Image (cartoon, rainbow, N blue to C red):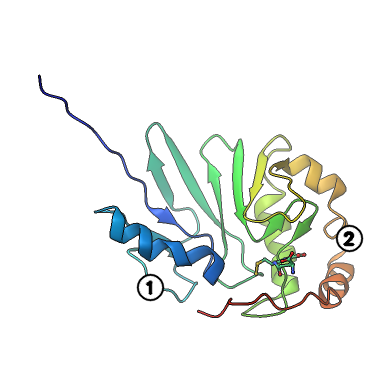
Amino acid sequence: YVCIYYIIIIPKINTHCHADHITSTGLMKKRLAGLKSAISKFSGASADIHLKEGDKIPFGRHSLTVRETPGHTDGCITLVTGDQTMAFTGDALLIRGCGRTDFQQGCAKRLYQSIQEKIYTLPDHCLVYPAHDYLGQTVSTVGEERKFNPRLTKSMEEFVEIMNNLNLPKPKKLGI
Ligand SMILES: N[C@@H](CCC(=O)N[C@@H](CSS)C(=O)NCC(=O)O)C(=O)O
C-alpha cells in the first residue's frame, strides 16, 4: 500500500530578538528541512519572514494575527488566534507582571501603551500565554490581568516609576 504523509509546517515564530528565545531557531532549521523563521521587521534580526502589524500566519483551519507590542524590545509582537481566544504575548505581558524595560531598547512608556492598546483591547476571556513565568503559572486571561496585574492597574507615570525601580539582575548570556 501507499502511505502519504502530509506535513504542514508553520514558521518558527519568535516574539522578539532575545537570545533566550531565538537561539533554538537555527538548530531547528538544520533538523527540519523547509522550516522558515519569522520575526518582526522591527527586531533588527535576519529571518525568512519579516512580520508586521496585522500579518496573518495560517495553520490548518486557524491563523495567528500579529499585533506589534514594543517596549520590552522594539520588535516585540503578540500573536492572537483568529477567534481572539488566545494571545501569545512573549515578554510584553507576563502573568501579574510584564517584560523588563531596562536594556536592549526597553522603554516603559512604549510597553504600557502596547499593553493597553494591543492586549487589553482583546476580549476579557482571551487566554494569555506569556513566554516566561517564574512562579510556575502557565496561563491567565486578559480580564484577570486587566483587574489584577499589579504593574498595569496603574497610571502610565506610576508604571514608569515601577519599571525604573525593579532593580533586577541582568540575565546572563543574553547578548546576541
Ligand atoms: N532574575 C529573574 C528575572 C529574569 C528576567 O530578567 N526576565 C526577563 C525576561 S528574559 S529578558 C523579564 O523581563 N523579567 C521581568 C520580571 O519582572 O521579572 C529570574 O531569572 O528569575
**Residue at point 37% right, 52% down?**
11
Q: In which quarter of the image is residue 124?
A: top right
Q: Which kind of residue does numbered mark 1 sit on?
A: Ser
Gap in angstroms between the C-alphas marked 2 and 1? 36 Å
Under circle 2, the secondary element is: loop
Percent across and percent down for residue 88 are: 59, 49
Q: Which kind of residue does numbered mark 2 sit on?
A: Lys
**Residue at point 27% right, 38% down?**
7
Q: Where on the image, by quarter, is ligand 1? A: bottom right
**Residue at point 75% right, 72% down?**
109
Q: Is residue 51 visible?
A: no
Under circle 1, the secondary element is: loop
Percent across and percent down for residue 147 are: 86, 45
Nearest to the eye among marks 2 and 1: give it.
1
Above or below, comparing residue 60 to residue 93 in the picture: above
Percent across and percent down for residue 56 are: 43, 48
Q: In this view, does 144 lie to the left or right of 92?
A: right
- Label 1: which residue? 46
- Label 2: which residue? 154
